[in-house]
Image (cartoon, grey):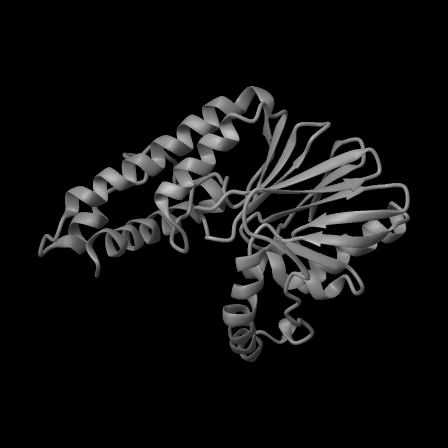
Amino acid sequence: MHRERVSENVFWFQSEVYAQVTAGVIVGPQWAVVIDTLALPEEALTMREFIEHELGVQVRYIINTHYHADHAWGNCFFPGATVIGHAKCREYLIEFGIPSLESSQKQNPALRQVKIVPPHLTFDSGEMTLRVGKKNLILSTTPGHSPDGISVLVEEDRVLFAGDAFMPLPYVVDGDADDMLASIKKIGRMGLENIIQGHGDIILRGEIDAAVKENLNYVSNIKKAVKAAGKRKNVDEYLEEITIEECGKSRVYLGGLAETLHRRNLRALHSQMHGE
């Protein structure tokens, strides 16, 4: 697992096992806030060990940027922590997370110790704030990747933990392309020093404008391409011919996973637009 100090008392973690998924921790004098919990038990526990033994504090709060397994299934490895998330995050973890975990546990013995812990504190609009030592955290809604998406701004440092509202390749299969465009534009207007993507590497200040433009361009391009598909009889062949490069991205992103995600985006958008 990669780990990096982003700013004073703010740390970033990145999985080497699953899709470059990320998490973070903001450390106060007596306790810490974790943002997302990575994909696998061993990684969540490694993160907890670093916080407790290297940084010398306990985790009091966990913020889930959304309900997907690679961001929220590790909640249970921080016993006693209060989990914060969108109201829909709580709803989806109960409705979808529990049966999904039960199914996954039959396939993967490593997940047998996982238990779903939905958010205890929720909000569904506007902002929520949380003070950690000298840092003010501002939680706000950024849907698009999923309806329950939120981002966490470390106000003093202008560091944004964006969750999957910002990724090397925008992914809208469980969300909405128009919501994604709105969230990316919102992030682009925030005057940030760093964007911590839900997957992939940290985006630095000098790279943000180009990354925002590239993500907006990609989502707009796949919308146009899928709209043009209409209700063609050979729609599968047509969608297959829409390359990731034509839409403004590279297939090498996310360790080569980007091509698969691009294909899923096209199929999901076609289903949403044309009701199939």
Q: In this view, does 220 lie to the left or right of 195?
A: left
Write down the quadrant of residue 39 in the picture.
bottom right
Q: In this view, does 18 lie to the left or right of 238?
A: right
What residue is at 66 percent from the left and 72 percent from the top?
Answer: 115
What residue is at 22 percent from the left and 40 percent from the top?
Answer: 225
Q: Is residue 208 left or right of residue 118?
A: left
- In the rendered image, the quadrant that contains the C terminus is bottom left
Coordinates of residue 261 in the picture (x, y in percent): 39, 50
Front one among 171 and 192: 192
Write down the quadrant of residue 181 in the picture.
top left
Residue 23 in sight from this viewpoint: yes
Q: In this view, does 29 lie to the left or right of 135?
A: right
Front one among 68 and 248: 68
What residue is at 50 percent from the left and 39 percent from the top?
Answer: 166
Residue 160 lies, with reference to residue 53, above or below; the image says above
Coordinates of residue 162 in the picture (x, y in percent): 57, 40
Coordinates of residue 73 in the picture (x, y in percent): 62, 63
What residue is at 23 percent from the left and 38 percent from the top?
Answer: 224
Residue 185 lies, with reference to residue 169, above or below; the image says above
Coordinates of residue 32 in the picture (x, y in percent): 81, 47
